[in-house]
Amino acid sequence: MVVLVSATHALIQILGTVALLLWGLHMVRTGIVRGFGAQLRTLIGRSVSNRVKAMLAGIGVTMVVQSSTATALIVSSFASSGLIKAAPALAVMLGADVGTTLVAQILSFDLSLLSPILILTGVVMHKTLERTLYRQIGRSTIGLGLMLLSLKIIVATSEPMRDSPVLASVFTSLSDEPLIALLLAALLTWMAHSSLAVVLLVMSFASTGMVSISLALTMVLGANLGGVLPPIMATMNEGVLARRVTFGNAAFKVISVIVCLPLVEFLPGLLEQLEGSAIRQVVNFHTAFNLMIALVFIFLVPVAAKISERLIPLQDGIDAPEHPRFLDTTAIDTPAVALNCAAREALRMGEYVETMMRGVITVIQETDKKKTVELKEMDNLVDRLYEDIKLYVTKISRQEVDEPESQRIAEILSFATNLEHIGDIIENLLDMAAKKDKKQLRFSDEGLAEISKLHAKVAANLTLAMTVFMSGDIAVAHQLVKQKRVINAFERRVTERHMQRLSQGRRESIETSALHMDMLRDLRRIHSHITAVAYPVLDAAGELKKSRLKKGA
């Protein structure tokens, strides 16, 4: 009974320590991704010219972030955006799986003496340094120290569990049922979202004799199998191109596990000849398994890519405009990259608004019911993109962002909000055009020409606003603000001319007066939203006073 209580207490402590291991791993990954995410993504993007380079990039990036899942999500996001083809993406994934085994190799050595030093160093860096990069390095250092500490605790705590008859019976049963052991390890890996953590846990159990080497090797295969599940689940809604990468990598693992599982019982003797330590046998098998997968399938990735294209074909609507094209969810942990994604999506939203702006004058000038329906559907699309961008930028703002990034968040939200308002006003103009058609009204030639001219000026400044948003050019921003006075003056002049036509008793002017004035007003409102794009840029540059532009602006 004493042994059972001791083992139960140890099991509870191990579960808590495993949670500490996962948290340490999360801190390392988060710190590296936030501090160096842009550089790592660039490295992957520049290393896909051939399969070998792609695989080496996968190894390097995964060793740094200590997560093949993180690498998989980056690669799949590139594939989804069309920035990388399936074959090199699969090569990167082969390298990522090798990279995570090399991390396990390093952590298999007794580095517990470094744990307090790393934790102390990390805390000092994170608390005393102001620069975001150094704080993220400190975060990663703390995480690495916690990982080493948790591994030491797991090994020390699992000692009493060897004497538990209940656990001995459980592990003996698993040894006799390798398929169940395989699936159990795969399930644990999926729940932990980390094959590295499960392999380290199995390695610790094997070092104390809690599990046999054969069972440990089987569970390592299960960890490798379960490691493909998180990327698959994460990319289910990311489109066909992303799924081809994750499912292709999963196929490599499944085939290899099926081939290797029957051979597990013959491997312990061979591994013992290389190194006698149980820890080294487990980690060496983990590395050899993934290395063999990489060496075999690196030559087959072009074939695998073609097979994936046949099995997972492009579907109608997969590139439908209502789906965000640039909002890469894997980039949120790297604010600089994520903000660039949000800006590109906002610019895409602006292109739809620009299309609406060009189309509305056609509907005003001549009856086109089909065009009206198309433009109204486009406004619904603009509304959906606005919600997606707003939600995405909100997630970015929850990360640790510096002052320039915070300003860029404000600029993106302001730009997207103004675009959404412009879309709503254009929809109102479409309703007025439909009303004119329904009542069979006709603008005077002069009145229609004035509306068309004002529209042309506003549309040209919309293009100017998009330039300001993307470039942040202060001179162009000043030019856009000056256009507000020009547009307001022009609107006043054409309003006076319309009033003159009313005083002359012009029938067309009298019948369409309300519509004419409302259209002029709405075009001016659109221009106010266009001009508003310039103010965040000027404010960030210190070019604004509280109530007006600085003199000379």
Image (cartoon, rainbow, N blue to C red):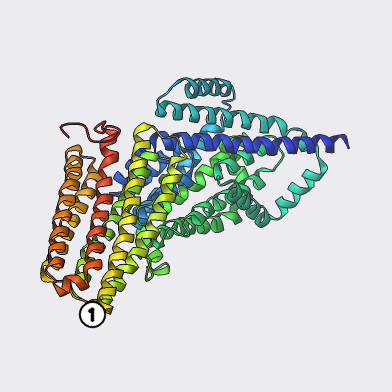
Kindly indicate the quadrant of the structure image that contains residue 450.
Answer: bottom left
Q: Nearer the viewer, residue 202 or 241?
A: 241
Q: Is residue 503 left or right of residue 540?
A: left
Q: Nearer the viewer, residue 247 or 400?
A: 400
Q: Is residue 508 left or right of residue 118?
A: left
Residue 335 rendering spot, x and y as whole percentages: 39, 40
Kindly indicate the quadrant of the structure image that contains residue 542.
Answer: top left
Q: Residue at x 65, y 57 (%)?
A: 179
Q: Residue at x 44, y 45 (%)?
A: 394
Mark 1: few/some/many CA within 10 Å (<14, 14-19, 20+): few
Q: Is residue 220 left or right of residue 503?
A: right
* Quadrant position of the C terminus in the picture: top left
Residue 401 rendering spot, x and y as whole percentages: 41, 35
Q: How many marks?
A: 1
* Quadrant position of the N terminus in the picture: top right
Q: Is residue 300 visible?
A: no
Q: Nearer the viewer, residue 110 or 73?
A: 73
Find the residue positioned furthest to the right. Answer: 1
| Amino acid tagged 1 | Gln
Disc 1, SS: loop
> In the image, is residue 1 above or below residue 453?
above
Q: Is residue 379 visible?
A: yes
Residue 425 rendering spot, x and y as whole percentages: 31, 60
Residue 38 rendering spot, x and y as whole percentages: 35, 39
Reading the image, the residue beneath label 1 is: 440
